[in-house]
Amino acid sequence: MSNSDLIPRLRSGDRRALARAISLIETGGPTARALLAEAYPCAGTAHLIGITGPPGAGKSTLVTSLTQEWRRNGATVGVIAVDPSSPFTRGAVLGDRIRMQALSGDPGVFIRSMASRGRLGGLARATADAATLLDAAGFDLVLIETVGAGQSEVEIARTAHTTIVVEVPGLGDDVQSIKAGMLEIADIFVVNKADREGAEQVVGQLRTMLHLGRREPGAWEPPVVSAVATLGRGSSEIVAAAGAHRSHLRNAADRAASAQAHAERELSAALQELVLERLRGPLWSAMVDQLATRVRDPYSAAGMLIASLKGREPEKIT
Amino acid sequence: MEHPNPTIRVLVAKPGLDGHDRGAKIIARALRDAGMEVIYTGLQQTPQMIVEAALQEDVDVIGLSILSGAHMTLLPKVMHLLREQQLHNILVVAGGIISDEDALLLTAEHGVSAIFGPGSSTHDIVHYIRSHAGKPRE
């Protein structure tokens, strides 16, 4: 398979081309950037939805029941499921597909497992770019399931339009719900396993917490939805809430500002990656040695490296 | 085809109806510890589900564990579907209770690359995959 026509092929529905393009994006480097440059202008129509929450909360099962609901409504769905890589061997066991068997055989669904490859924050470096490929391939929705997340894996909120935070009963007392972090990024709360004891208290605590916060007039108010993902209960409410959130985003007064903020974060991430990649070389190694022996401090070493960038030709990516 | 990804990706699946996946999980863990990315899809996979997952995940290797005795039906079916989807470059290895005669047929006539029977060491399996994955087999 040649790499040069992958984007036109994935846009015409070639799933093998889509799968290969995601692998190349994961590997990174000039090939990945050329693919992204070609796909980026074709993307921008899909609704990107993040699903996050602690390990075992039922995220994969919820992805399945939500996907089934969207498919019943006639929408196509791309799924990216991220699981952690070992910090020691860099290997990974990606098990999210186990809970997604019911989606097998549906040509309107494409599922890709992704290892975090050392990135903290709940996503892999290539997750957002892979979402751009699924978007360019024409999927109406792109669901991004994060690694099982604790309290501060909030990167998903910067990537997705709508962030769903999944909670379950029995994880802690009500102080958890006033802490900063995860709970602040939710556009929709789902209390999964709602047939278990304590679910109503969790719903109550979340609602109380939401009412305590100050909210600008016209701001989105995150709904709290009870669900039993294994039975599909709550899916239609969540799908409706996601649709309502998207309409809200489209009509929001600060829409242009939030698009600007999103673009700024994308640019910042790309800049970091490119600069780091270009600076790794003999001078980089020398600076690392000098830091390790405390001959030099980190900021002056970084200054030396940035000074060495001047006068270099920009990389061609097309 | 150029091998795009220095990280070896392996699909580990159990085709058919047997419900025992301890061996498959041990293999998944061993491959993980060898630095590979293992997509584990669980029990009771049809050949169609396995090939669809392999395509979407763009894996280099499929490892099939099969203890039910139905290997002469299920494995050729997987190989046939892979060819149909033009996934010629995926290395297919299998493990389980498979007689020497069947193993010979599966490798010589159906394109399975290797069979690892009971008593195979995970070390041998890792070594085999490392030295054969991602190379053209046409």
Image (cartoon, rainbow, N blue to C red):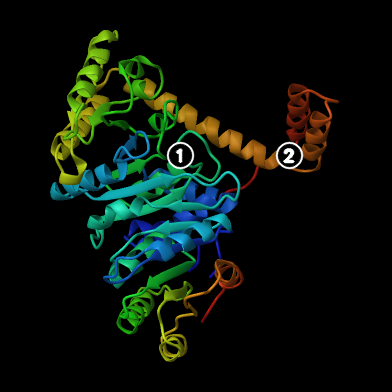
In the image, what residue type sits under mark 1?
Leu
- For the residue marked with disc 2, what is the amino acid? Arg
Up-down: is A76 above or below A191? below
Which quadrant of the structure image shows residue B99?
bottom left
- Regarding residue A197, the answer to whether it shows in the image is yes
Q: Is residue A107 above or below residue A164?
A: below
Res A122 quadrant in image? top left
In this rendering, the answer to whether A80 lies above or below A196 is below
Q: Chain of mark 1?
A: A
Image mark count = 2
Q: Give the side of residue B11 with respect to residue A79, left or right.
A: right
Disc 1 packing (10 Å; few <14; some 14–19; many ≥20): many
Task: Evaluate whether label 1 is on the same chain as label 2.
Answer: yes
Q: Position of residue A205 (x, y in %)?
A: 24, 17
Q: Secondary structure at mark 1?
A: loop
Question: Is label 1 or label 2 in front?
Answer: 1
The residue under label 1 is A123
Chain of residue at mark 2? A
Residue A183 shown left or right of residue A130 in the figure = left
Pick whichever, A69 or A217, lies toward us.
A69
- CA neighbours of label 2 inside 10 A, class few (<14), some (14 to 19), many (20+): few
Q: Residue at x 58, y 48 (%)?
A: A317
Q: Looking at this view, is A24 or A250 the one in front? A: A24
Q: Quadrant of residue A257?
A: top left
Residue A23 in the image: state x and y as whole percent: 48, 56
Residue that label 2 marks = A312
Of residues B78 and A230, the one nearer the viewer is A230
> Which numbered disc flags the more N-terminal residue, 1 or 2?
1
Q: Position of residue A41 (x, y in %)?
A: 41, 44
Separation (CA) of disc 1 from disc 2: 32 Å
